[in-house]
Amino acid sequence: MSKTNPHESALSPETGGSGDSHSGGETWWSRPCGGRDVLAIALPLVVQTAFWSVMWFIDRMFLTWYSADAMAASLPAGMLHWTMIGLPQGVAAFANTFVAQYYGAGRHERIGIAVNQGIWFGWVVTPLFFLSIPLAPLLLAHAGATPAIVHQEVLYFQTLAIGAGAVVIAAAQSAFYTGRGLTTVVMIVNIGGSLVNIGLDWVLIFGKLGFPELGIAGAGLATAAANWSVVVVFWLLMRRPGERAAFGLGNFRFDPELFRRLMRYGVPSGLPMLVEGGAFTLLIMQVSQIGQAEAAATSLAFNVNAVAFVPLIGLSIAVSTLVGQKLGENRPDLAERATWTAILIGMLYTGVFAALYLTIPDAFMALHASQADPAEFAPVRAITRELLKFVALYCFFDALQILFVGALKGAGDTRFVLLNAVVVSAIAIVVGRLGRTWLGENPLYWWWWVMTGWIFTLGVVYCIRFVQGRWQTMRVIEPNLQPDEELVAAPCEAE
């Protein structure tokens, strides 16, 4: 295996990286793990997740055009779906940290084995998602909405479940590229999947090109088909002989010790998604009981917020990758710098959207309103304007919590992430239920205050944990793997 810089794609002078750390001309932008290096990895992921935002936005917009019931049903059913896949997806996606740390340590032959453990895990849990399809009426029976909306929720959940396994498998597949900093590949594949989803949405929801009109079931089927298309494309890419030989992708053997460590760190990484997703689903169900307009406005507000929030997921993955790589190189100083660089970028980005939510809220609803029934949409618009004020308030702390979580996961500090998610989410639900009892018939804004406090607390606690610095001594790879000094030389020298 030839000796190359394990981070040459982002940090080498030849590719526009940091260059000579002793040149005396370094800036926040040009220094190692500064703005340029972080964005080199993050931008493709941000673009990819921006396409996810557009996809979800258009999906909800089509459902708004189709009927208010479909729009109201999409959020509770969608949240239950994401709650179901949160744990296994989190486990499979944690292969990214293994790939990043092996890559930073120069142990490329271990990368493919780690990725394959995650892929096999995805195939094992796929049949469990199919078993959830007949259980959907029972799972959503107590959602508190009208029978017509519950029926729509069941249809949406059942069709989404067909593609749930693909989400888990693709999370492990994409880790093979993101963990090495090759995020452009992941961007292209996922943009393709998003375009497939959008096209099938139009065809299946409204019955175009000779297909039957399926409404919300068509939206779910479109998403499922797009998810499996991503798995197929990744599979084809990962069959290239050069990479299979260099990174051990052809080694499909079960590695008990590596799989145990994937579970040890991956389960605490995925469980917060399950806990927070479950708590969030309970909150949405509470809002759905208030009324159709309130449920639809809440769904619309979250859909609008996705435009700002979802790209931060890409930035978080980039942070996790850089932290993992730098810890693999035994350079926690650069891992810390990369995190604070991403925090500044994330806060600036979020601040722009917070200002827009406050000043031009109707602009974000224009497409939804264009084909919706005016009388039906009017109360939804009025409520959504108020809810976007909450979004503008909490989105800064949402950025903090997702980026600090990315950094902590890149080190392997997943048990703390789990503990914080459990405690804060439980407190939020208890406080919300108590307030619901006291406030009477229409506690919509109470639930939104609870959610704002919930996100604020998560962001602050994760920030404190990161500043304490315990993550700097953590590793998920074998403790006897020390980085080759030739592999981690000059391009990553600190000032």
Image (cartoon, rainbow, N blue to C red):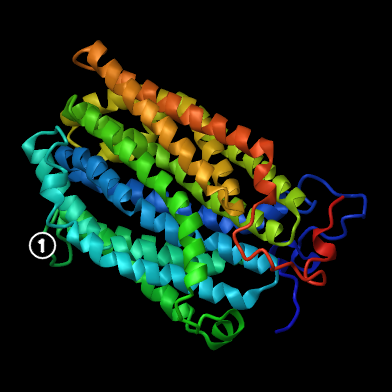
SS at mark 1? loop
- Find residue 195 and report its image quarter: bottom left
Residue occupied by mark 1: 212
Viewport quadrant of the N terminus: bottom right
**Above/below status of 442 relative to 484:** above
Q: Residue at x 38, y 38 (%)?
A: 304
Q: Residue furthest left?
A: 147
Q: Position of residue 448 (x, y in %)?
A: 35, 24
Report whether residue 458 is seen. Answer: yes
Label 1 crowd (10 A; few <14 / some 14-19 / many >=20) = few
User: In screen coordinates, is 150 left or right of 74?
Assistant: left
**Above/below status of 254 relative to 146:** below
- Find residue 246 and report its image quarter: bottom right
Report the front residue among 36 and 282: 282
Q: Residue at x 27, y 34 (%)?
A: 282
Q: Residue at x 44, y 38 (%)?
A: 421
Q: Position of residue 58 (x, y in %)?
A: 32, 49
Q: Position of residue 463 (x, y in %)?
A: 60, 34
Report the front residue among 335 and 361: 335
Q: Residue furthest bottom?
A: 241
Tag 1: residue type? Pro
Q: Residue at x 61, y 52 (%)?
A: 411
User: In screen coordinates, is 228 left or right of 412?
Assistant: left
